[in-house]
Image: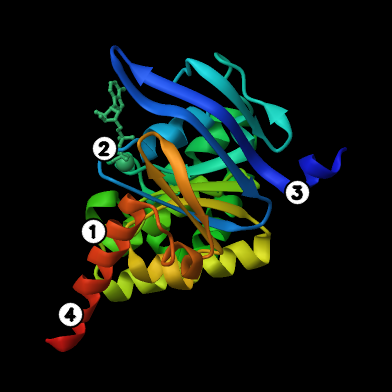
């Protein structure tokens, strides 16, 4: 295995994705290092979710190459579902299934395991994300927002993937629940050695959890680096974005 394959979990080169006449991603390139938590920021409707879905093979591309864990993702093939876990933006759980059944869903789809083993795995994953075995028999309607995100996370981790994709995981949570979720991501990343690719607008997540932050504007990654470097970026969109965020934060502190 070459050095580059060792170093990067995801390599995207010259990616072009569009719908009809609209070009969403325009010769975008991005490297995600193994074991890092990379945050992705960008304007609403700018293509953050499209980028994530294209990397995992759910959206076809018009050009460019994508490699995940050293394996090329084909234009049509979806790659190995076991290479990643995903928490989608509209990451709804299946409302007619219990928590346990939700977490077991990827196991059922991909493996043949005894019910006993699947039950053990489900409980282990729930405990890993800070839930209790008693929560396993609840239905999604009986869960708080923070618990729902944790169940979705347990489901994403069901197949022990090396990469975790999170699409705005803390949006809609109160600041305390969001902070707890961030701490959980950091802990899981550290203990499981996960690579995490996270779309977020949450300034606290960007500064405390992400090793690096990438900014998507005009269909490209226009800046990437540790948060302190992004704050120094000269790119007009990046400046405007973080300047706005900073002033929001200052206003908040002055209240
Ligand atoms: N399946 C689709 N078909 C057509 N247009 C889409 C599809 N998915 C996303 N788009 C468009 O692509 C653009 C980027 O969307 P998205 O990636 O969801 O933005 P965001 O950065 O907010 O996550 C938007 O203009 C959206 O309308
Ligand atoms: Mg989105």
Name the element at disc 1: loop
Q: Is 66 in front, or is 227? A: 227
Which residue is disc 4 drawn over?
Answer: 252
Look at the picture and state if 226 lies above or below 112.
Answer: below
Q: What residue is shown at x 40% (from left), y 73% (from top)?
A: 180
Count residues near mark 4 (Cα–Cα under 10 Å), then give few for <14, some for 14-19, many for 20+: few
Q: Is 204 in front, or is 118? A: 204
Count residues near mark 1 (Cα–Cα under 10 Å), then give few for <14, some for 14-19, many for 20+: few
Count residues near mark 3 (Cα–Cα under 10 Å), then give few for <14, some for 14-19, many for 20+: some
Instruction: From the top left corner, tell me how far across and down residue 227 is, in percent.
Output: 47, 66
Instruction: Please report contact status of discs 4 and 1: CB closer than 8 Å, yes or no.
Output: no
Q: Earlier in the sequence, mark 3 or mark 2?
A: 3
Count residues near mark 2 (Cα–Cα under 10 Å), then give few for <14, some for 14-19, many for 20+: few
Foreground label between 1 and 3: 3
Which residue is disc 3 drawn over?
Answer: 7
Residue 47 has which mark? none
Which residue is disc 1 drawn over?
Answer: 172
Q: Is residue 109 left or right of residue 132?
A: right
The N terminus, quarter of image: top right
Q: Is 75 in front, or is 94? A: 75
The C terminus, quarter of image: bottom left
Foreground label between 4 and 1: 4
Look at the picture and state if 33 lies above or below 92.
Answer: below
Which residue is disc 2 drawn over?
Answer: 45
């Amino acid at each position: 295995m070459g050095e580059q394959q060792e170093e990067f979990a995801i390599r995207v080169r010259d990616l072009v994705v569009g719908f009809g006449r609209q070009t969403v991603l325009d010769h975008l390139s991005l490297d995600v290092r193994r074991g890092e938590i990379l945050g992705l920021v960008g304007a609403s409707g700018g293509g953050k979710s499209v980028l994530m879905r294209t990397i995992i093979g759910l959206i076809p591309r018009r050009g460019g190459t994508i490699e995940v864990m050293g394996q090329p993702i084909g234009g049509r093939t979806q790659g190995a579902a076991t290479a990643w876990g995903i928490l989608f933006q509209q990451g709804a759980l299946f409302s007619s299934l219990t928590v346990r059944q939700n977490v077991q869903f990827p196991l059922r789809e991909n493996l043949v395991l005894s019910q006993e083993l699947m039950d053990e795995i489900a409980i282990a994953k729930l405990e890993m994300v800070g839930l209790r075995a008693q929560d396993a028999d609840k239905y999604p309607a009986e869960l708080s927002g923070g618990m729902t995100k944790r169940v979705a996370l347990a489901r994403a981790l069901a197949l022990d993937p090396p990469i975790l994709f999170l699409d705005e995981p803390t949006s809609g949570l109160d600041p305390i629940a969001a902070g707890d979720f961030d701490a959980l991501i950091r802990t899981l990343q550290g203990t499981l050695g996960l690579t995490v690719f996270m779309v977020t607008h949450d300034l606290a997540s960007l500064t405390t959890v992400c090793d690096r932050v990438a900014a998507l504007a005009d269909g490209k990654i226009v800046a990437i680096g540790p948060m302190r470097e992004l704050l120094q970026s000269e790119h007009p969109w990046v400046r405007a974005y973080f300047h706005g965020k900073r002033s929001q934060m200052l206003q908040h502190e002055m209240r």
